[in-house]
Each structure stands twice: as structure tokens, then as C-alpha cells.
Image (tube, grey):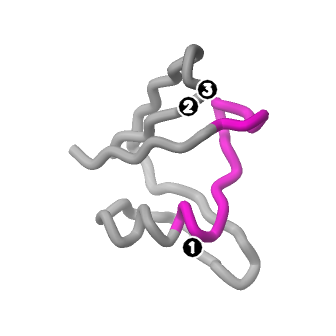
Amino acid sequence: MLRFTLELAGRNPDKPKLTASEAAEMVTIGFRFAEYDPEGEQFRLSLPYRTAQNLDRDTLTIMQ
């Protein structure tokens, strides 16, 4: 199972908007995207994926 943890920093944990660098790192790890447009900064992960939020650290771990 692939895992990627990002800092929420005020983003919605239900649908966090990924930065271009986060999305690029996730592609390198092997995550699959339904939409991957670095120039337009549009990124949507392919389903299924799960998330786990850590409130103490203000992070979200995405698993696919």
C-alpha cells in the first residue's frame, strides 16, 4: 500500500488541494491520478484511496 503524508495547513481534509510538488512526489512514489495537469495545477487521485488525519500534527496521510 502506498502512503503519502502532507501538512494540511488549513486545507480541507476531505478534499485537500494538492500542490504541484506534492502531486509530482506522489506520482514518483506510484500513486495513480485520474487527472494530472501540472501546468493547470489540477490533480485528482484515482479511486479507491483512504485517508487518515492526525489532528495533533495537522497532517493527512493518503493511502492507495
Residue under numbered circle 2: 59
In this view, the mark in front (1 or 2): 2
Q: Is residue 16 located in the magenta-colored stretch of the structure?
A: yes
Residue under numbered circle 1: 36
Q: Nearer the viewer, residue 47 or 8?
A: 8
Q: Residues within 10 Å of mark 2 (few under 14, many from 20)?
A: some
Q: Nearer the viewer, residue 3 or 46?
A: 3
Based on the displayed image, in which of its 4 quarters is residue 25 positioned?
A: bottom left
| Residue furthest front in the image | 57
Q: Which residues are magenta?
A: 8-23
- The three-letter amino acid code for the residue at tag 3 is Asp
Q: Residue at x 66, y 36 (%)?
A: 8
Q: Secondary structure at mark 3?
A: loop
Task: Tell whether 21 sits left or right of 2.
Answer: right
Q: Nearer the viewer, residue 32 or 6?
A: 6
As measured in the structure, the alpha-carbon distance from the residue carrying label 1 to the one carrying label 3 is 25 Å
Q: Secondary structure at mark 2?
A: strand
- The three-letter amino acid code for the residue at tag 1 is Tyr
Q: Relative to 40, say whether 5 is above or below.
A: above
Task: Tell whether 40 sits left or right of 34.
Answer: right
Q: Secondary structure at mark 1?
A: strand
| Residue furthest bottom in the image | 39
Question: Are circles 3 and 2 on residues that touch, CB within 8 Å?
Answer: yes
Dot 1 or dot 2: first in sequence order is 1
What percent of the width, then of the height, locates residue 37? 63, 78
Q: Residues within 10 Å of mark 1 (few under 14, many from 20)?
A: some
